[in-house]
Amino acid sequence: MSRVKNILFIMCDQLRADYLACTGHPTLKTPNIDALAARGVIFTNAFCQAPVCGSSRMSFYTGRYVQSHGATYNNVPLKIGERTVGDHMRELGVSTGLIGKTHMQADLAGMKRLGIDKGSIQGVLAAECGFEPWERDDGLHPDAFVDPNLAYNDYLREQGYEGDNPWHSFANSGIDEKGEVASGWYLRNAHLAARIDKAHSETAYMTNRAMDKIAELGDTPWCLHLSYIKPHWPYIAPAPYHNMYSPQDVIAANRGEKEKADPHPVIKAFMGHEESVNFSDEEKRRHVIPAYMGLITEIDDHIGRLMAFLEEQGRLDDTLIVFTSDHGDYLGDHWLGEKEMFHEESVRIPMIIVDPSRDCDATRGGRIHALTEAIDLIPTFVDALGGEAKPHVLEGKSLLPLLRGENPAGWRDFAVSEADYAWRGARLALKLPPDQTRAYMIRTERWKYISYDQFRPQLFDLEKDPNELIDLGTSELHAEIRNEMEETLNHWLRHRRNRTTMAHDVIEERTDTAKKRGIYFGVW
Amino acid sequence: MSRVKNILFIMCDQLRADYLACTGHPTLKTPNIDALAARGVIFTNAFCQAPVCGSSRMSFYTGRYVQSHGATYNNVPLKIGERTVGDHMRELGVSTGLIGKTHMQADLAGMKRLGIDKGSIQGVLAAECGFEPWERDDGLHPDAFVDPNLAYNDYLREQGYEGDNPWHSFANSGIDEKGEVASGWYLRNAHLAARIDKAHSETAYMTNRAMDKIAELGDTPWCLHLSYIKPHWPYIAPAPYHNMYSPQDVIAANRGEKEKADPHPVIKAFMGHEESVNFSDEEKRRHVIPAYMGLITEIDDHIGRLMAFLEEQGRLDDTLIVFTSDHGDYLGDHWLGEKEMFHEESVRIPMIIVDPSRDCDATRGGRIHALTEAIDLIPTFVDALGGEAKPHVLEGKSLLPLLRGENPAGWRDFAVSEADYAWRGARLALKLPPDQTRAYMIRTERWKYISYDQFRPQLFDLEKDPNELIDLGTSELHAEIRNEMEETLNHWLRHRRNRTTMAHDVIEERTDTAKKRGIYFGVW
């Protein structure tokens, strides 16, 4: 018996799966997220569909692979017409909205072509990825392009932080040793305290907004996407989080000399990016990561506050809670910074789900190692709320059977993630046109295979080499495995759900019915 | 120098590539279409993207493969948001409309979701595949479902043909030997004359409507899709076309005993369909095909009339003319009826293009054997009218270089066509779910390879076996060729244009520009 009425879908940005105490980080403190996990389940093998914000999120929000929705990178507009979580939830009578970041880029050309007024309800929803924009804030606001009406800046000014862009000058800047304002855009300033009271940080503010909205919604069923920008850069945290962790708390980088000496051409090009060069410097790495860790503990504190609030509101019993992230962060592992490629540090995501239903009691506090994907969330929500599965559109699988402790037959054998680095310097270094920059990861329990346009594949044996330090992409011994994996990829490519306008049961009803409809052909 | 200002895009329905005098039919008379070919070019290796009306047309009209547009069969709605020929033409200031058939099924659910009013201009265009519906008539009107406002029925009643559905009772019925009305829905009545004057037939009427519209448009640039339902069934023609050809004029069936004795499982299932059983009967075949041929000569007469009209209007000099068909017709070849599978009789289409520009003089009256596809038409139109290529959306290639007699480097090595037989009795016979019914054809100059879900592939050597009577799908000698072809298919699947909301030049402009936009990451 599901007792789920509401969905609280919490996403962090760039939070690595292994940067929580409950997922094994030895020095990081995340007691509230750990408590969440104790009430629910940790999915230890959850993968994002693209290790970059925009395309990963479009998969989370559409329940479809990047190959299917086509928004292959940040700021590629999601095609008008793609259905999103809001469409699926609203069909079930659930009010669905956003507080925080989506990285949605509206298909304005498509909207214009179809005469969709940006000010109409449908226009707003189409432009906001199906969410009611209770408060949209994508969280990166360079001075030159800052929205003069940014609500968080208005809020900061109300608190006394002055200027055109207090998001930058206060919330994401510190005061350096010379007493000057030092921008959080620069890694060198990661050790400084952000110039705001922790009660006014982006994380605090968005949590407040979520609590306000939940209180306002009362007994109306809701799906709230609380989407924190942190611990995404700028890597700068308010006190006390800015110096809660020291360089000694930073775990060793996962990287090998052989990786650096003989890299795959695409990885080599990424190693040449500024973020990779800087994060490869151990001193810089240990300078920055404590801030990243502080930002995580900050989030954890607000998760605690939010859970106390939900309890007080009586919502813990009827709300399914998801805690996840859009992708990870290399932080210097494999001689890389940022994300985009497919090592576990980048592509594996934290995924904690708490379903209050009694039939999920069996798995509480446990870990589920089955391969799961970001696109599984919408089918899970639909299932929890009693909606119909839509396998002709949604490409993921409901996680409810796993949450109930079942061992569903035919669970997936592999997870897929995709990349498109057309916009990156790596493409220029590799001298590629913008349509030859895709890569696909096929990740089974044991193997990780990465197939690149124009270059040889990579292969890792996660059983023998869990740290992915030995690329078997040219190993003669592994030719057969690579072929099998490539076949798996091809089968997957062929079976993307493109026939999205007709449900399978409609096809069943219509099969071989021409005569019934008065259409006679081939009849003597 | 292009002098093209207008596009006349003529499509027949179910007209086989080899059923014209100018493409080699020994007994059929098509002097006007032959004259068109003499003024232009016959593309001898033109293929539809799906050998079935709806999905083939959605590829013609979107310039995209079925895998990309997703309307995989008749009546599968074309996803809202897919751009069509009308969108591309209107950007160039060209008035674009339809007279006749499209088989477009509107994505009404998508329109509703986006708040698109069916009565608005954008709503009408979205529902009509981007065409202004100057007169839409899909041409099959069973009595039980006939639109009471069908314009052609109104027209027939004005001419004195009475009843609820004179489309059926007059234009597509005859009078049998007992003096009773005999429906053209039945093959056995194919020898009868339709009960209308030839001046009132569907083909005559649509031609009239096209001429009226062209006259009305005057000097406004236009793209007119004149889309005849014929020679598609019901196979019944008005006098004198009904008995213009006799069984002696019917060419021999292209079929072999081995094909019948040991067919591929999917082909075997299709052989079991009623239309295949009936067309496999030589007597029935020779009874029906003369009517099919008569309908073609009827079209030819009206093409003559239309060309005389264009000449009189002074439009021959500034109008690019295309004459083609959505797919072929087995007519009993390979023991099959109808279409849907990939033998040349079904998948190869007639394609004649007349470009009045002087730089196309070199090829007039010639034949071009390069592999061409239905999706090449929109890029050709855009190119002829001076528009920009859109390789991120349009998957075909402009034919203008070929029309100018150039030998463009890197012309395609293979054509692709796709099938989805989920709606057919064959699926039930094969006991398949509706998502395991796709097939893909890869057709090179020499080989035709067909890859099916769930079953072994087929392979034909068109050099040694141009009639496709010997399936090499299990030949050990050809394992390597099959592997190569499967690899080609996989490469193709991987490179479908799904990133349709961002042009390549926008990507070039934006590559590696984060810093310019004030977004600093990984900067020390």
Image: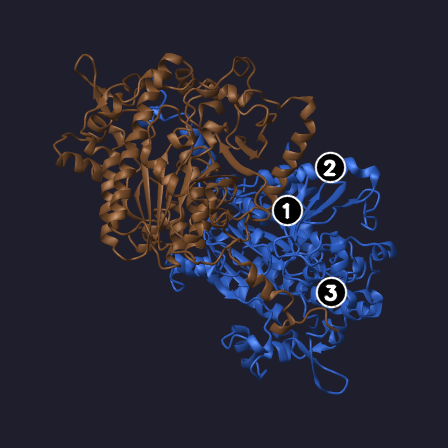
Chain colours: A blue, B brown
Dot label at residue A483: 2
Please state the chain letter of the residue tagged with numbered disc 2 in the rendered image: A
Q: Secondary structure at mark 3?
A: loop
Query: In front here: B312 or B48?
Result: B312
State whether residue B99 appears in this view. Answer: yes
Residue type, label 2: Asn
Neighbour class for label 1 at 10 Å: few (<14), some, many (≥20)?
Answer: many
Disc 1 with disc 2 on a shared chain:
yes
Q: Residue at x 45, y 42 (%)?
A: B59
Amino acid under disc 3: His
Of mark 1 and mark 2, the one earlier in the sequence is 1
Marks 1/2 in contact by CB < 8 Å: the verdict is no
Residue B19 point in image, percent of width and height: 39, 28
Q: Chain of mark 1?
A: A
From the viewer's side, name the closer residue of A18 and A412.
Answer: A412
Residue shown at the point (59%, 79%) measured from the top left: A166
The image shows residue B487, relative to residue B62, as above or below, that is: above
Which residue appears farthest toward the front when viewing the image?
Answer: B362
Q: Say if A444 sits above or below B450 in the image.
A: below
Q: Is residue A406 visible?
A: no
What residue would you read off at disc 1? A373
Q: Are marks 2 and 3 in contact (CB under 8 Å)?
A: no
Quadrant hosting residue A172: bottom right
Comparing A523 with A48, the one in front is: A523
In the rendering, which numbered label is found on residue B212? none
Q: Is residue A87 above or below residue A428?
A: above
Q: CA distance from mark 1 to mark 2?
A: 24 Å
**Which quadrant would the N terminus of chain A be assigned to in this image?**
top right
Residue placed under numbered mark 3 in the picture: A273
Residue type, mark 1 in image? Glu
Q: CA distance from mark 3 to mark 1?
A: 28 Å
Where residue A218 sits: x, y (%)? 47, 58
